[in-house]
Image: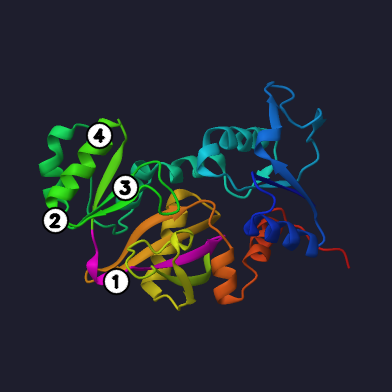
Amino acid sequence: MKIGLLASNPNLYSNRRIMEAGEERGHEMVFLNIKNCYMKMDAKNPEVHFRGGNVLSDLDAVIPRIRPSMTFYGCALARQFESMGVFCLNSASAIRQSRDKLHSLQLLFESDIDIPVTGFANSPLETDDLINMVGGAPLIIKLLEGTQGKGVVLAETKKAAESVINAFKSLRADILVQEFIKEANGKDIRCFVVDGKVVASIQREAEPGEFRANIHQGGTASLIIPTAEEKRIAIKAAKCMDLKVAGVDIIRSLKGPLLLEVNSSPGLEGIEGATGKDVAGLMIGAIEKKLKWRQAE
């Protein structure tokens, strides 16, 4: 098969591994830099062109790995490929809704998936009640557009929370406030879901003095065996978001496991390094299964 990897940085570990895994399984892999792709919208003959006017007309599948800053254009390209009959491992609509933190949380609790108590308001006049509705300080404040732990603040006192919330509001930034799960001790669980199965899991632990367990924020990864309930939540969350590939982040609380976030372009370095599993190969395998591909003898 000919498989395109729609992404921005060919040197990123995750992207290199996907390219290698596809080639190892006998496929022709093509790296498609999002910025170098452009579209012809035509009801009878939709096209995607690549730098220099090359028409991308013979792809069997595309793996979208769209960074948050490129969500709008990257998803437009993925939709264009879909309109051409090219299979996208994660659909444009699934990526879009998973990137909308507020919408995704609403979809999750509508599906009876437990999340930390979360508040959202547009007006800074409601700051006091917003803080109280999530149990008061300490609490977490998240920018809706944040990713990889960026734009996430721990406010340890009510006064600090009021200051941060009002500062964000003065910048017209949309934020969520969320209860702080102290008993998690700076740890969370990343379950990597491929095609409806948890294929690998790690525990991420924040460095000393930090509350964010993201690897990009200096967190460390170690092997962990998730409980049956944690696996159930991860699989249900990926299905709820309609994602074939997802990184599902779960935190352990006194109330049981709570879902933090669902990532449509989860990184591979931490999870492959800690588990030794060929997660990139499993992603390619999901495409083979969908397109009923059989390797020549």
Q: Which mark is residue 135?
A: 2
118 relative to 188 in the view: left or right: left
Which amino acid, mark 1?
Asn
x, y percent for residue 210: 34, 64
Q: Which residues are magenta?
A: 180-196
Q: Which residue is mark 1?
A: 185
Quickly name the residue at label 3.
142
Is the residue 248 above or below the residue 150 in the image?
A: below
For marks 3 and 2, give the CA distance: 16 Å
Of residues 93 and 71, the one nearer the viewer is: 71
Q: Do labels 3 and 2 touch, CB within 8 Å? A: no
Q: Amino acid at mark 3?
A: Lys
- Can residue 120 be seen by looking at this rendering? no
Mark found first going from the N terminus, 3 or 2: 2
Mark found first going from the N terminus, 4 or 3:
3
Neighbours of disc 2 within 10 Å: few (<14), some (14-19), many (20+): some
The amino acid type, in three-letter code, at marker 4 is Lys
**Which residue has dot 4 on it?**
169
For image coordinates 66% across by 55% down, the residue present is: 15
Q: What whole-number distance in Å separates the C-alpha atoms at marks 4 and 3?
A: 12 Å
Indicate left or right for 237 with 2 as reference.
Answer: left
- Closer to the camera: disc 2 or disc 4? 4
